[in-house]
Amino acid sequence: MGFLNKTRGRPLRDRDVSSMSDRSIQTRQSRIFQLPGVRVIGTGSYVPDNIVANEDLASLGCDAEWIVQRTGIRERRHAAPGMTTSDMATIAAERCLQQSGRTADEVDLVVLGTFTADLPMPATACQIQDRLGINAPAFDIQAACAGFIYSMITGMQFVANGTSKLALLVGADTNSRVANPEDKKTYPLFGDGAGAVLVETGNPDQGLLAYTLGADGSGHDLLCIPMGGSADPVNAPGATRGQQFMRMEGRPVFKWAVRLIESTIKDVAREAGLELSDIDLFILHQANSRIIDAAAENLHVDRDKVLVNVDRYGNTSSGSIPLALDEAFREGKIHPGSRIILSGFGGGLAWGTALLSW
């Protein structure tokens, strides 16, 4: 048995990253599956009260109009000191239960998508489970900004095979704790937030008409937190260099994301036997309005069907899609029989795209 290749396995801080921005990540083909007979019966979300407008970042050297032009973001929410990912996730879950008319003692599974866990160990989902008084298995899934899609599909599989009757599926991230205030290109992109859904057995025409999950580890260093894992444990020199914060090479990630969204959405629609014009709502990961705009233009879809809230919340990572889904439901944009595209993508590189029949 051999060890990791010394170039690929050594800590990111020791690598030559000068050419990262010029890298091109090819879009990998991932398998398409179906998961019918599972329905969403409730949604909920939470964002902190603290609004951080672009103008509030001027002291960091960030230009407000530049942020809008490059990202479409005008403001984001930051958690108050002491507020954790589990705090936000629990509130979103409580609202989801209230909206659905169900109670915590009916829930028999909790799955949380997050990369900003309260602690490296144990799973933050266990804290949500305890605080809600749920007697059920609980675990985290770490797939960065694709975390909620991974969690949703995993939870739906539990319901589809009869292992779970009522699953609470959550996405939440406290990005303000892992974004570097000295990184003017990355720090303004991110906000904090959480969203949740409840799923149970439904009719054969409900559930995931088609979905795909995928990953490409060759791009793992394009979007990552270099320090804090077994490759480079927490250390003072690394902290001095800001290695405990998120780092992102925006250009190759942007190009990859646009291609990925277009190809996976076409794939799942084709598998379901639908045209893109048959889709009622497109909820893409709210990473950047330019990514959303480029993907929508390439797909030639009606822009009124593409939900955008990145201007108000920024990139909330795993919280992005369930937060937007809850917002769309509360605004009356989702009805029984609605066909909704959900597409998440991020560090890993990892992605998931699903065609959900409500």
Image: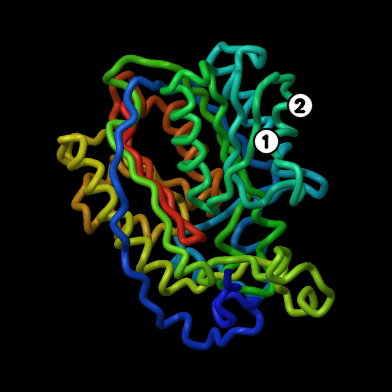
Residue 35 in the image, given as x and y percentages of width and height: 34, 29
Residue 267 in the image: above or below residue 60: above
**Furthest-front residue in this view:** 1
Disc 2 element? helix
Q: Secondary structure at mark 1?
A: helix
Q: Where does the C terminus fall, quadrant-wise?
A: top left
Residue at 71% x, 65% y is 230
Residue 305 in view in this figure: yes
Going by the image, does 268 lie left or right of 75? left
Tell me, for residue 125, which label it has, or none: 1
| Mark toward the viewer: 2 or 1 | 1
| In-image side of 4 versus 353 (left or right) | right
193 shown above or below 189: above
Question: How far from the left and from the top, in percent, is residue 36?
Answer: 32, 25
Residue 265, percent from left and from top: 27, 47
Alpha-carbon distance for marks 2 and 1?
10 Å
Q: How is the image coloured?
A: rainbow
Disc 2 to disc 1: CB gap under 8 Å: no
- Which amino acid type is marked by label 1? Ala
Q: Which residue does the numbered mark 2 point to in the structure image? A: 131
In front of the other: 217 or 356: 217
The image position of residue 337, as x and y in percent, is 28, 21
Residue under the image location 48 percent in, 35 percent down: 154
Q: Residue at x 45, y 70 (%)?
A: 218
Query: Type of residue at label 2?
Result: Arg
Task: Tell me the crowding category of disc 2: few under 14, some 14 to 19, or many 20 or more residues within 10 angstroms, Cα based.
Answer: few
The residue at the point 39 percent across, 25 percent down is: 332
The answer to whether residue 63 shows anywhere in this view is: no
Residue 322 versus residue 301 in the image, above or below: above
Question: Badge 1: few (under 14), some or many (20 or more) residues near its Cα, within 10 Å?
Answer: many
Res. 288 mark? none
Q: Earlier in the sequence, mark 2 or mark 1?
A: 1
